[in-house]
Image (cartoon, rainbow, N blue to C red):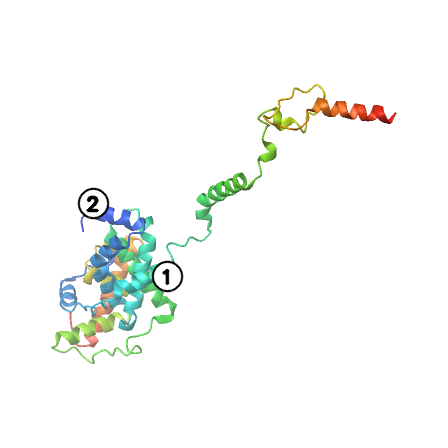
Amino acid sequence: MSPENLPPDNDAKLADFLNRNHPTPPPAPPSEFAQIRHAIETQGRRRHSLTVRNLRWWVPAMAAALLLGFVVSHDWSHEKKPHNLTSLRNFTASPDATWVYDEGSTERSPSEDWQMLADEINAQK
Amino acid sequence: METERIDEIIQNISGGDLKSFQELYRSYAGVVRGVLFKMVPSNQIDDLVQEAFVKIWKGLPGFKGESGLKVWIYRIAYRVAVDFLRKGNSRSSQELGEDLPAESGESPVLEKNLVRGLLQTFDPDHRTVLVLYFMEECSLQEIAQIVDVPLGTVKSRLFYAKQKLREALKKKGVIL
């Protein structure tokens, strides 16, 4: 029987009876909220499971975390360009290189190294 | 509770504010306890009230306000009760040691026990509509939202539940 075809029904007596005999619950224990609070704190706040619905934000969040992890942990030192010729001295040790001495340095210039090497070769001949 | 205050409380609770949650608890504990008391055995109420409020705490940040807060809270209490009953706890009140009075007496306490005892013999669908419509004074539309069924289903369930209740009361000597 569809709801539209249900016979008319006088609820007044039933409603009155149920209102008069409305069962009332026993009072809550005084510590009820403390127990609820404890349950909330114990269970942790809003644990999210990895559902398809959550993937909407999990995927970009995970991608961002991975990228950040890579940026932080990656050794970028070999990618850096040298700032001045001093940094280049081990790589451009040619006789023609322009050499800038550090103040007070006792190191020889590359041209001196080349000269010493030439002298040594000549001496062995 | 005023709408603006409700919005503020929801916002605070979403941020993890337990003081605001306590305020919400004070306002709605009676509603939750009342519904559960009419739906489940007495010895389960404290546990189920706690379960309902943990669900409210977890679910409130997702509350979109499509239904009123009270309807939403009723819905959670209803689901907690129905989940409990469907887990094989849908035993009659006699089995739970809450004996029904043999017949309706003059005492209001007896009649209250009679109503509650009879409700516990009904299936959860009929029990729910009777409790929400007659005792919690929810509208049919609100019941449809709480139970998440079409309005026509609510009307149909209410019709048959009333019929069943009248018959059960008649057997106990109460003719309505």
Crowding near the residue tagged with mark 1, few <14, some 14–19, many ≥20 C-alpha atoms within 10 Å = few
- Give left or right: position of B44 versus A21: right
Residue at image x 34%, y 62%? Answer: A39
Looking at the picture, how far across and down is residue A19, in whole percent? 15, 65
Q: Is residue B101 above or below residue A101?
A: below
Residue ranking furthest to the right = A125
Which residue type does callout 2 highlight?
Glu
Q: CA distance from mark 1 to mark 2?
A: 31 Å
- Give left or right: position of A79 versus A117: left
Badge 1 vs badge 2, beta-carbon distance below 8 Å: no
User: Does residue A57 appear in this view?
Assistant: yes
Question: In which quadrant of the rendered image does the C terminus of chain B lie?
Answer: bottom left
Which residue type does callout 1 highlight?
Thr
Instruction: Please name the residue that numbered disc 2 is placed on.
Output: B4
Q: Please tell me which residue lies in front, B65 or B144.
A: B65
| Chain of the residue where label 2 is placed in the rendered structure | B
Choose top left, top right, bottom left or bottom right for residue B49.
bottom left
What secondary structure is found at the residue carrying circle 2?
Answer: helix
Q: Is residue B15 above or below residue B54?
A: above
Looking at the picture, how far across and down is residue B174, in whole percent? 16, 74
Looking at the picture, how far across and down is residue A13, in whole percent? 13, 65
Give the foreground label among 1 and 2. 1
Instruction: Please name the residue that numbered disc 1 is placed on.
Output: A42
